[in-house]
Amino acid sequence: MSRSSIARVLALALAGSLALCVGGGCKDDSSSAPKPAPSAAASGDLAIRSGSGVGLTFSYPEAYQLVVSTANPEANQIAISSDKLPGVLTIRLNTVDPTGALDLEQLAESSRVTMDPSGTIERTSMKVGTQAYPARSVHSTSLGLLPETDVLAVVPIGGRNYLITLHAANEDVGKAARMFAVVLGSLKPG
């Protein structure tokens, strides 16, 4: 993972934890999930694994790693990323109030301020399964060098509200889109 991606994941984790924590004392002790065996299913030349976490099941490309963080009793998350391929996808769940409303505008603004106060936000949508959800694209410049985009959406699945964030350097958005599509197209309650 590039230095910029590592910094971005850390900052997103912090911003997400702050946004989803209720009250003080939030702690995030991430733990790596065991790697599941690859499935026989493949999308073209893309080998696919099955994964689960935060009350969801999904598929993801074998070349990516899945990290499930459940140590924080107030906000759990999964992250899917790769050391060699672009794109980071995170899904966060407020475990104190999983059905509670999440304010997309506030979450996008928090991300913008945390990542790059001079960044911009624009309205967009995110397709999960067969449905499009309102989303916000947060455009920023990481460490003052690399133009990047985060797309955030609040998505209800199985009666719970999840914050889904897609992250990629602008030059890698097209390359990361394949991973994003595999995961988003397969999300189910589980």
Image: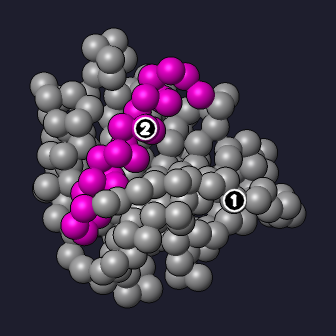
Q: Quadrant of residue 52?
A: bottom right
User: In the drawing, what numbered circle is on residue 10?
Assistant: 2
Can residue 125 be seen here? no
Considering only vertical position in the picture, is 190 above or below 7? below
Q: Residue furthest front?
A: 25
Q: Earlier in the sequence, mark 1 or mark 2?
A: 2
Return the x and y of residue 152 as percentages of the image width and height. 30, 53
Return the x and y of residue 61 as percentages of the image width and height. 69, 50
Position of the N terminus, as image quadrant, is top right
State yes or no: residue 12 in magenta. yes
Residue at 67%, 28% in the rendered image: 84
The residue that mark 1 highlights is 33
Residue at 41%, 56% in the rendered image: 27
Colouring convention used in this rendered image of the protein: one colour
Residue at 38%, 51% in the rendered image: 165
Asked whether 123 or 154 is in front, the reply is 154
User: In the drawing, what numbered circle is on residue 123?
Assistant: none
Please tell me whether mark 2 sits on a helix, a strand or a loop: helix
Asked whether 35 or 44 is in front, the reply is 35
Magenta highlight: main SS = helix
Give the amino acid at mark 2: Leu
Return the x and y of residue 136 as percentages of the image width and height. 22, 50
Q: Quadrant of residue 111?
A: top left
Q: Quadrant of residue 69?
A: bottom right
The region drawn magenta spans 1-24
Can residue 121 be seen here? yes
Give the amino acid at mark 1: Ala
